[in-house]
Amino acid sequence: MANVKLKIGIIGCGGIANGKHLPALKNLDNVEIVAFCDIIPERAEKARAEYGSADAKTYVDYKELLKDESIDAVHVCTPNRSHSYITVDALEAGKHVMCEKPMAINSAEAKKMLDAAKRTGKKLTIGYQSRQRADAAYMKNECLAGTFGDIYYAKATAIRRRAVPTWGVFLNEEEQGGGPLIDIGTHALDLTLWMMDNYKPKYCIGKAFHKLNKDTEQGNAWGNWDPDKFTVEDSAFGMIVMENDAVIMLESAWALNTLDVREAVTSICGTKAGADMNDGLRINGIRQNLQYTMKPNFSAAGAAFYDGAKANDMGTLEAAQWVDAIINDREPCVSPEQAYTVTRILEGIYISSQTGDVYRFE
């Protein structure tokens, strides 16, 4: 299958498409990007000029793109609210789908995607590229090797001090379904569940805050936000208890008065050892009745996932394993079932915040 070239279409040619998906796909020799769709025609034309095949086409209506039977897969890079129906339509049209995170704005919409993938037999994955980081891949392999034993406590962290995204529709609750919890907290939660290999939540409790939205003295990394348009939470926190009584603490913020700034990281504690990503990857445990801390070195040239190599950036690694999954009929790194559980938990925290009560999963 080495000579197979996948034909891929891009639906949504904004920031995430240009920042991750298109550069990553361009790095792969077994891919042709043959179609670009955006409601702003100029964006689709610009993307085609930079990344498209010689005969690539542009569209304003994604349904017209899906009529092209030569397209093998599509990448859905649109605002969160449209993830579900575009993905379902694409699967029904016979395309494999890489959908950008989060899977959907709520569990009902995510379930439609999951059901469509099962019904059509087409592959569906969600863009949790943090799994491809060197530290995450190493920690996961240690989990698989049984290094940590039974993981019963974990922290999922995505905290920014003052880094509110002011472009696109990030601040629009109607389009996005939420703020930092669904935007960056979702990465931290995905990493944590993946490390634990535990996708059975029992209940959760959480709180979303709108404490800094109206600030006029903002000190924001990307310039001042418009307080009137900042309708999503600025921070959100939750506790999730799993069916096996393991506990996960989830913390997320775009704006928080703190110096403890870390994004898309996880800490895990098991019966045999623990690990965190607080100062690079650190693994801790007991050997010969003495405490130890071990820090893998990911900076040496020639090491797997060397961060300085263009072909080994997170986006390219994510795209490469996705394309390989299609060509060689393998399971993609992120399964839709896993992403569905992430969405269910995020939704549970939002509902708990609104009701002031514990949210119990059915």
Image: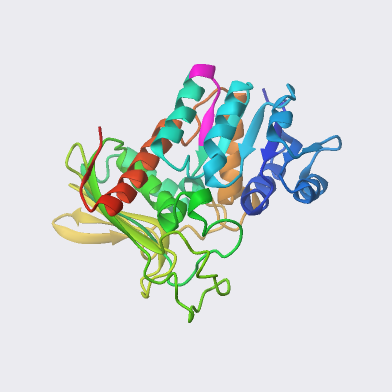
Q: What residue do we see at 61% from left, 44% from top?
A: 77
- Picture quadrant where residue 168 is located: bottom right
* Part of the protein shown in magenta: 119-125
Q: Is residue 70 left or right of residue 182?
A: right
In this figure, which colouring scheme has been used for the structure? rainbow
Instruction: Give the answer, above or below, for where 231 lies relative to 97.
Output: below
Q: Say whether residue 123 is magenta.
A: yes
Q: Report the residue that reaches farthest toward the bottom.
A: 217
Instruction: Give the answer, above or below, for where 271 lies relative to 123.
Output: below
The quarter of the picture where the N terminus appears is top right
- Picture quadrant where residue 267 is located: bottom left
x, y percentage for residue 154? Answer: 26, 52
Residue 335 visible in the picture: no
x, y percentage for residue 12? Answer: 66, 44
Q: Say whether residue 68 is magenta.
A: no
Q: Is residue 109 left or right of residue 58?
A: left
Q: What residue do we see at 36% from left, 71% from top?
A: 260
Please state which of residues 342 and 352 is positioned toward the viewer in this rendering. 352
Instruction: Give the answer, above or below, for where 164 lies relative to 307.
Output: below
Q: What residue do we see at 51% from left, 67% from top?
A: 228
The quarter of the picture where the C terminus appears is top left
Instruction: Give the answer, above or below, for where 89 lies relative to 361.
Output: above
Q: Is residue 181 left or right of residue 170?
A: left
x, y percentage for residue 250? Answer: 31, 55
